[in-house]
Amino acid sequence: MIPTRATTAIEKFLSTLRSEATHRQRRAFLSEYVDWVASYRQCGVSKVTTRNLLDEENALAWLAAAHRGTTRRRPGLAGPTAPASANSMAARTSSVNVFSRWCGHPLDLVPPSPEFAARLTPTEAHRTLRLLSGHHPAGMTEAAWERSVALVALAVCSGYGIAALHPLRLADLDLERSLPQARVAGEWFPVDAVSRAALARWRTTHQALTAGHLKVLQGGDVEELWVTTAPGRPRGGRAAPPAGLPAAVRTLEAAHRKLTSLALGAPLLIEQFCPVLDDAG
């Protein structure tokens, strides 16, 4: 039986999702939808019903508001009220479509066609990696810079984006062999000299950041490759978590956006470093 309260139904729906990234995305957009309905109806979030979310007119009105940028919670690169991108609108539409199907009342709204950012050629990707690796930009901590460069190095070497790179563990790096390699999505890829240096540098910093966590983690090492480089924020009266704990996707993406903005003058997506073939290739 589908719960009447929208927030309860969403929690039950989210519990059926296996992918952390999908879970996070669906939660964000469905929560935005609930907030919009609450504002539109001038009631509290707890008063929003599942039926409200399954109303096609409500869904279309929310999507229209989101497209105008009026539901934006964080300032984007083009300002706090910039129109939403086609990709985020497609994700919003998909979220409400999947949720409505789970509720047994499919809306089948038509999503916009996705937009794909231009990718670098292999030559451009390696040259940009070399540039990023050799210059620590002012305004970014050294550890965050090292982590972001290592992330770019793996994107360049493997051709995989953040979804495949985020779950990596220390055991996925084999840098001591004569031909260094890294394992992404179950496959081993050769690592060039620039990438090896960037990965080795980050691994050393990783060890320094996580050295004091044996007791914190009840005797366990931090095996995740990507860890935080600064203490987190205290929440709910609890002490701030220390640096060196597993980093979230959004943490990696924010640091990468900052690195490319500072070093290149414009932000690039991690996926843009997954090279396409040269025209002559």
Image (tube, rainbow, N blue to C red):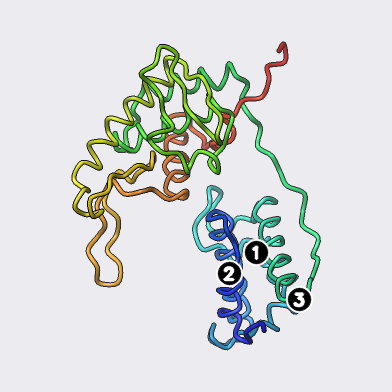
Residue under numbered circle 1: 66
Q: Mark 1 and mark 2 in contact (Cβ < 8 Å)?
A: yes
Vertical arrangement, residue 210 with respect to residue 10, above or below:
above
- SS class, disc 3: loop
Helix or strand or loop: what does disc 2 sit on?
A: helix
SS at circle 1:
helix
Neighbours of disc 1 within 10 Å: few (<14), some (14-19), many (20+)? many
What's the residue type where badge 3 is placed?
A: Gly
Amino acid type, mark 2:
Glu
Q: Nearer the viewer, residue 279 or 150?
A: 150
The numbered mark, 3 or 2, whose residue comes first in the sequence reads 2
Quadrant of residue 115 within the rendered picture = top right
Front disc: 3 or 1: 3
Q: Which residue is the site of mark 3?
A: 104
Task: Give the label on residue 32, or none.
Answer: 2
Crowding at dot 2, Cα within 10 Å, few <14 / some 14-19 / many 20+, comes out as some
Q: Nearer the viewer, residue 37 or 93?
A: 93
